[in-house]
Image (cartoon, grey):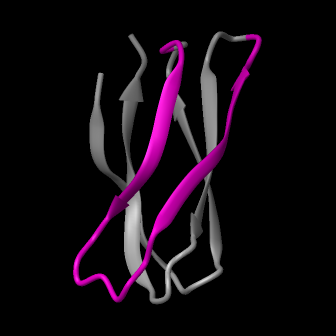
């Protein structure tokens, strides 16, 4: 299932990185998250990498992603993404 506009708005200046995690009750399989880039955008280009997953013994999965601003300006973002099919 896809998701948009998840989490608090986070500002990234050029060269900055934000580390995110999100948890579901249960395991939703493979998930991919990227930056839900907001406007106004001052020249930011967001790269999502370091996608990871941890699963607790109780069956809950936590997903992790790093968002890097490789652009010449900053802007706000939060997360969007969803499952692979």
- Height in image: 9 above or below 64? below
* Residue depicted at 61% across the width and 34% down the height: 63
Q: Is residue 67 left or right of residue 82?
A: right
Q: Is residue 49 left or right of residue 77?
A: right
Residue 44 magenta-drawn? yes
* Residue depicted at 41% across the width and 21% down the height: 83
Q: Is residue 50 left or right of residue 37?
A: right
User: Is 49 in front, or is 27?
Assistant: 49
Numbered range of the magenta stretch: 28-57
Residue 29 x/y as whole percent = 52, 12
Q: Quadrant of the N terminus?
A: top left
Residue 70 x/y as whole percent = 57, 73
Residue 4 x/y as whole percent = 27, 46
* Residue depicted at 64% across the width and 78% down the height: 16
Residue that sits furthest to the left in the current view: 39
- Height in image: 79 above or below 8? above
- Height in image: 40 above or below 63? below
* Residue depicted at 37% across the width and 29% down the height: 82
Q: Is residue 9 left or right of residue 33?
A: left
């Amino acid at each position: 299932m896809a998701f948009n506009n998840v989490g608090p708005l986070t500002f990234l200046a050029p060269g900055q990185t934000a580390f995110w995690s999100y948890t579901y009750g249960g395991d939703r399989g493979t998930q991919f998250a990227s930056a839900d880039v907001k406007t106004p955008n001052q020249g930011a280009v967001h790269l999502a990498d370091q996608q990871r997953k941890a699963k607790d013994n109780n069956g809950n999965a936590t997903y992790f992603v790093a968002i890097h601003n490789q652009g010449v300006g900053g802007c706000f973002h939060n997360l969007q993404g969803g499952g692979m099919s």
